[in-house]
Image (cartoon, rainbow, N blue to C red):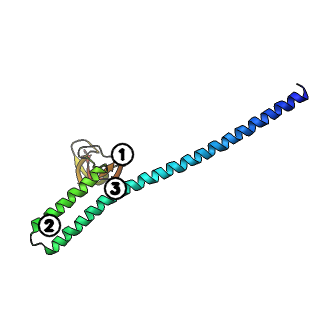
Amino acid sequence: MSGEAVDERLKKLEEENKSLKESILYLQSELANMRRLMDKEMDRVRLSTLERVFSRLITIYQDFGRVLEGLRSASNPFTTAEGFAMLYRELEGLLKSEGVERMEVLGKPFNPFEHEAVEYVEGEKDEDVIVEEIEPGYRLGDRVLKPPKVKVARRRATS
């Protein structure tokens, strides 16, 4: 190759290098913008979810206030009991509508990552099986929000 051809080739490669660097900078900028937009959208969805849940909680809170006010003035205990039952159903409905489910654990294998054993009892049947639910547990999707408190069977020691 002649000196001119080398110079021309070098100039062409430098231009190509400059163009590639500009493309990289542009793509990095686009990626940063996309991340910002996704963060904003996630914040918007999170806020929207919180607004929906809290608006329902506020309604239940206000109903609770009315029931408590009724306690002060009502002479009929049935009315008060019915008011509390209504609040319980409203809270239960809120939890269900948000995807919170009560965990069914009776007769299932004990899992220390999902269940809290409060007592072990000897039995004839399977080992590490839940035989009694002391307090219910709840999950949202595959996440445990509150582990259930349970009694777990252990095989009776044979002598």
Residue 11 appears left or right of 92: right
Answer above or below: position of 73 versus 112.
below
Q: Which residue is mark 1?
A: 142
Q: Residue at x 57, y 48 (%)?
A: 33
Q: Quadrant of the N terminus?
A: top right
Q: Earlier in the sequence, mark 3 or mark 2?
A: 3
Element type where label 1 sits in the image: loop
**Who comes first in sequence, dot 1 or dot 3?**
3
Q: 79 and 9: which one is in front?
A: 9
| Residue 101 in the image, given as x and y percentages of width and height | 28, 49
Tell me how far mark 2 sits from mark 1, CA to CA: 37 Å
Q: Amino acid at mark 1?
A: Asp
Per the image, label 3 sits on a secondary structure element best described as helix
Give the left or right position of residue 133, taking residue 21 as reference: left
Q: Residues within 10 Å of mark 2 (few under 14, many from 20)?
A: some
Q: Is residue 52 visible?
A: yes
Depth check, mark 2 against mark 1: the one in front is 2
What residue is at 39 percent from the left and 54 percent from the top?
A: 48
Q: Are marks 3 and 2 in contact (CB under 8 Å)?
A: no
For discs 3 and 2, the disc positioned in front in the rendered view: 3
Q: Position of residue 32 (x, y in %)?
A: 58, 48
Residue ranking furthest to the right:
3
Type of amino acid under label 2? Thr
Provide the residue designation for mark 2. Answer: 80
Q: CA distance from mark 1 to mark 3?
A: 22 Å
CA separation in Å, label 3 and label 2: 28 Å
Residue at point 16% right, 71% down? 70
User: Mark 3 belongs to which amino acid?
Assistant: Arg
How far across and how far down the image is residue 128, in percent?
29, 45
